[in-house]
Image (tube, rainbow, N blue to C red):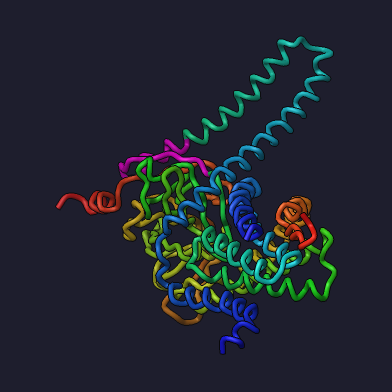
Amino acid sequence: MIQLLKRYREMVVTAVALVVPLFVYFAHARHPGARTAVDRLVVSASRPVEWLVGKAITGAGIAWYDYLDLRHARGEARRLSSEVNRLAMDRMELRAVRAENDRLRSLLDFAPAAAGAPIVGARVVGVRLDPKGLQLLTVDRGSDQGLQRMMPVVAAQGVVGRIHSVLPGSADVLVLTDRNSSVAVRVERSRARANVRGSGDPTVARLDFALRADDFLEGDLLVTSGTDGVFPPGLPVGRIRGLRKGGQGLYQHAEVVPAADVTKVEEVLILAAPREEAAAARLGPP
Amino acid sequence: MKRALASFALAVALAGAQSALSLHLGGLPFALPLLPVVWAAVEAGLLEGLGVAVAAGYVLDLFSGGPRGLLVSLTVAAWLASRLARSSLSVRGALGFAALTGGATTLVGLGALLLARFTAAPGTAPAASLVGRVLLESLATAVAGLLLHPLLRRLERFVERQPEPGLLAR
């Protein structure tokens, strides 16, 4: 037997490497465990590369646009003084700052709708919209800033998702369009209730449990109902598209176009009330 | 061992890089940690390559955020398929490597969608529409393979086994 194993050692090792992980997967597929210390270490090790590549891309973009500006400025320099050039550059910088300010201001305008929870602002530093796994955004705030799992994450346009895992200086956000994400919603116009479930495609989600008898219309705005214990009520989630009622069945079906485009979102707010506190705030005084 | 460690470090770095790249490319999906796996299938021996596949599969599993084991197994399968392809196709050039990378990414992506259908909770099974995103991921990863081919060649020089001196050598 041992001779046989030695003879076919490579084949046996390969078969083990193929089959054992599959057993592990099928055993834990419904109840994935938390990250171990080694997992956290490996993820943390990737963060500097993520940061460096992000900075390199941003820097290259800025350098390219600066180069274009300089080429343009060189033509102008023949006619204008260097002072005008400097002012033009300043103006460009100010425009960029103003655009950022506008985005941040709209985030702040949005903040009062968030049920008085303490709010942590964060920047998106990574995106993993992997069709094989979970759809995650990485933000530059983590447990050091008081973030915990399941905290709601919103952008100025609406719901982005919820915190999925937390490291000291960063956190992963499970986005609204992930297959495992489900948000309890109401139609803003008619107050009819349903769920919005992710499809795995970052541009579209789907409407679940929308009763046939309830009042849903194409283009209706869906807002959080607050009944799922995660999101406070009244936050925009998305708009109904492709509404269809089959000949029979309890429910009507539709796609939902998310209010916040997760492929483009740059800054987010995290409603940082601990879960028990947030739930108590929504239930009101006893 | 040296190759497996270097490939693991590279896979972690590539996973971080793809996250930042996706952010600036509108959420374009990549599977960059598969690059060292395909490279090992082309260049490394069996047990060495298997070590690389398991290490990169762990990284893919970790960064995908899903339950453990699925992507390790599929990465080993992709490595085996790439080894088989290596023996029958000419894949040593950059274009051949990119094509093999695209094929391996498709295999892992479609395999993951298929197996996830058996285990997903009711209502959360991946839809057939995600096949399009898997193909997009394969294309993006193949292009990245083409661009990173010189880096992997450089890495190969670093990890390739030195000939052991014989009795007559000092």
Q: Is residue A143 visible?
A: yes
Q: Is residue A35 above or below residue A86?
A: below
Q: Is residue A156 visible?
A: no
Q: Is residue A108 magenta?
A: yes
Q: Is residue A88 magenta?
A: no
The image shows residue A204 at horizontal and vertical percentages of: 55, 60
The image shows residue A2 at horizontal and vertical percentages of: 57, 86
Task: Identify which residue, A93 or A245, lies in the foreground.
Answer: A93
Q: Quadrant of the N terminus of chain B?
A: bottom right
The image shows residue B133 at horizontal and vertical percentages of: 64, 64
Q: Is residue B157 above or below residue A82?
A: below
Looking at the rendering, the stretch of residues picked out in magenta corresponds to A106-124
Q: Is residue B131 left or right of residue B97?
A: left
- The picture quadrant where one finds residue A67 is top right
Task: Identify which residue, B46 or B107, lies in the foreground.
Answer: B46
Q: Is residue A49 above or below residue A92?
A: below
Q: Quadrant of the C terminus of chain B?
A: bottom right
Q: How many marks?
A: 0
Tell me which residue sits at (70%, 68%) in the image: B104
The image shows residue A273 at horizontal and vertical percentages of: 31, 46
Q: Is residue A223 left or right of residue B147?
A: left
Tell me which residue sits at (61%, 88%) in the image: A4
Tell me which residue sits at (57%, 69%) in the image: B72
Q: Which residue is farthest bottom?
A: A1
Q: Is residue B47 left or right of residue B168?
A: left
Task: Identify which residue, A249 or A276, lies in the foreground.
Answer: A276
Q: Which residue is farthest left?
A: A286
